[in-house]
Amino acid sequence: MCGIFGFAKREGWQSESQMDRIDDVISNLTFESVVRGNHSTGFAIASKTDKLVYKTLKPSDELVCSDEWHNVIDKVDVNTTVFLGHVRFATTGAKVKENAHPFVMGSVIGAHNGIIYNHEEIASKIGKNVQVDSEVIFGLLNKKNKYQEVFDLIEGDYALSWIDDDYKVLKLMHEEGRPLHIAYWKKARCLFWASTAEILETAFKEAGLSIEDSINTLPVDKVYEFDTSNFWSKHDAKFTEVKTNVNSSWSNYGSYGSSYGGYGGSNYFSSASAYYCKFCQSTTYKADRICYKCVGKTTNTLNMNTDGNWTAECLECFNVENYDNLVYTGSGYLCIPCNTQNSKYVSSFTSQCDYCGDYEPAPDLYSHEGYKLCQSCYDADKKTSKKSNLPVPTHGGFGI
């Protein structure tokens, strides 16, 4: 059993605060994924200028809590398009750094969760001397022009993430033997994925990102191609249906899971240590030890409820709301209905972007073709070659 996780996002779109939160989520995903493998950790980071691959034998939780992690996360910036992550529980091949994922096969860089039972046969067909069964998958993807030709040859269990020549396009696929879940943060134009929904949920919760409702299981036996240049309010993707070989040895997965199960679980995480925000004491993986919620904000009005969510009382109506449904005014928080020009706490403070729904200081909004746009949406529209590229606003108010 291994784990795959990561993100794919629109190039150059995100604000600094959104990038901080993406860093937090990917740190959390890396940390939480240790329950699926502790023999090695690896990443691929893609942008227009480079494709970097990093591998270590450190378990992912130890890596995140070490100084070495900052060397990894510092490579992620607003121009990063894809971040592929993998944790390994070795089933074939020695426990050495060279056998850690992701693997580079020609133009293909990919990570695999599962077991390929006929990898030696495939290796001989493609003329590769492989140490790990996963290598043959990406060798085939590099050689074959059609996906069906690849999956006709593979016998086993697999969930896959990979990129090839186009640094803007993420490809995900799994068959019924291995899980794969996705979630989309539309404000930041960012797609996250992980092997389990629980890993995603925990990563979002610890980063204070309320998009748990968007977590979905990726449909099986389809190769999804996510073109990040088309990420707007939705992550439209094209897919190719493939027929996979039914694996009669699926029961083997249970033996790997049970032998590894003693390592994972909630008790393991409770004993691990990460950074704690110097203001609110919530978990954070940022080197400055200030969580994104506390950057530039006073925290004396924030409280954590029994569900672990940050809340505050609205200055106007005194209702208690979740943090993501509040607007900070400089002196405290207002809920969305109370954030109007009539509020004595607002004056001329904020107004709403007509596309993404974010509330911004009114002077910072641009008037553009009949819409009020925040800096991010305005810049994104200016970068495109066509006029009025922003879709008609469909948001119903504040939200992710």
Image (tube, rainbow, N blue to C red):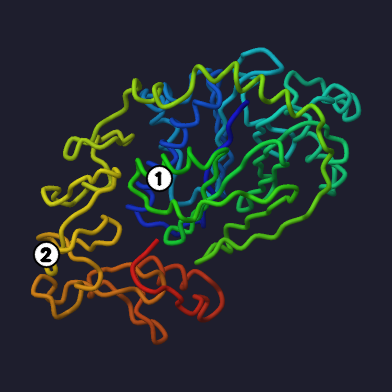
- The answer to whether 271 is drawn above or below residue 290 in the figure is above
Q: Which residue is at the far right?
A: 125
- Residue 268: give x, y in percent of width and height: 41, 21
- The answer to whether 112 is drawn above or below residue 299 in the figure is above
Kind of element beneath mark 1:
helix
Total number of numbered discs in the rendering: 2
Q: Tell me the residue at 37%/50% (across/down).
A: 209
Give the camera-side residue of 327 and 42: 327
Which label belongs to residue 237? Answer: none
Q: Quadrant of the N terminus?
A: top right
Label 2 is placed on what type of residue? Leu
Q: Which residue is mark 2?
A: 315
Pointer 1 with pointer 2, Cβ within 8 A: no
- The answer to whether 59 is drawn above or below residue 139 in the figure is above
Q: Which residue is mark 1?
A: 204
Kind of element beneath mark 2:
loop
- Residue 367: give x, y in percent of width and height: 34, 82
- Residue 276: give x, y in percent of width and height: 25, 32
Q: Quadrant of the C terminus?
A: bottom left
Q: Tell me the residue at 49%/54% (across/down).
A: 190
Q: Earlier in the sequence, mark 1 or mark 2?
A: 1
Judge from the rendering whether residue 81 lies leftward or rightward of residue 330; answer left or right: right
Picture quadrant where residue 13 is located = bottom left
- Residue 283: give x, y in percent of width and height: 29, 35
Q: CA distance from mark 1 to mark 2?
A: 27 Å
Classed neighbour count for the residue bearing mark 1: other residues with Cα under 10 Å, few (<14), some (14–19), many (≥20)? many
Give the camera-side residue of 13 and 31: 31
Give the camera-side residue of 293 and 372: 293
Judge from the rendering whether residue 55 lies leftward or rightward of residue 26; answer left or right: right
Q: Which residue is at the far bottom?
A: 370
Picture quadrant where residue 181 is located = top right
Label 1 is placed on what type of residue? Phe
